[in-house]
Image (spheres, helix red, strand yellow):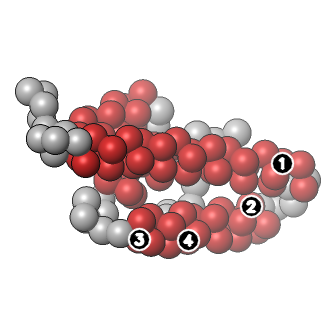
Amino acid sequence: MADYYPLIARAIAALDPNAPGESRRALYERARTALIAQLRSVQPPLSESEITRERLSLEEAVRKVESEAAQRAREASRPGGGARAGGGSGDAFRRASARATENNPPASAPPA
């Protein structure tokens, strides 16, 4: 099973930080569509349970990225805008995404 988190996190990090949630949702939908197309084109065909397992893995990555986005939004709405000595929460997210990428090389997944 592929780890889609680094792929999704990088794609979201590349979006404008001020972009509305709709931009993230559109990206997730494109990733879902591309994944299903790729999984359905594999020869020999994958079983439905294998396809479901990959879809659930993608959805877990989406949930994790959305949880991080919600946390950043909460931090930004606090007095002081969430800025800390270590930099803004967007910087922390980019650093975490870079570490995830280093620790988990991208799987052969469809581009989002």
Q: Which mark's residue is nearer the viewer, 3 or 1?
A: 3
Q: Is residue 45 above or below residue 68?
A: below
User: Which residue matches tag 1?
Assistant: 50
Which comes before the other along the chain, label 2 or label 1? 2
Alpha carbon separation for disc pair 3 and 1: 29 Å
Residue 23 got which mark?
3
Q: Which mark's residue is nearer the viewer, 4 or 2?
A: 4
Residue 68 got which mark?
none
User: Which residue matches tag 4?
Assistant: 30
Q: Position of residue 26 (x, y in %)?
A: 50, 72
Using residue 4 as the reference point, say whether residue 100 is left or right of it.
left
User: Which residue matches tag 2?
Assistant: 39
Q: Amino acid at mark 1?
A: Glu
Q: Which mark's residue is nearer the viewer, 4 or 1?
A: 4
Alpha carbon separation for disc pair 3 and 2: 24 Å
Which comes before the other along the chain, label 4 or label 1? 4
Q: Amino acid at mark 4?
A: Arg
Using residue 66 as the reference point, say whether residue 92 is left or right of it.
left
- Residue at x-position 38% and y-position 41%: 71
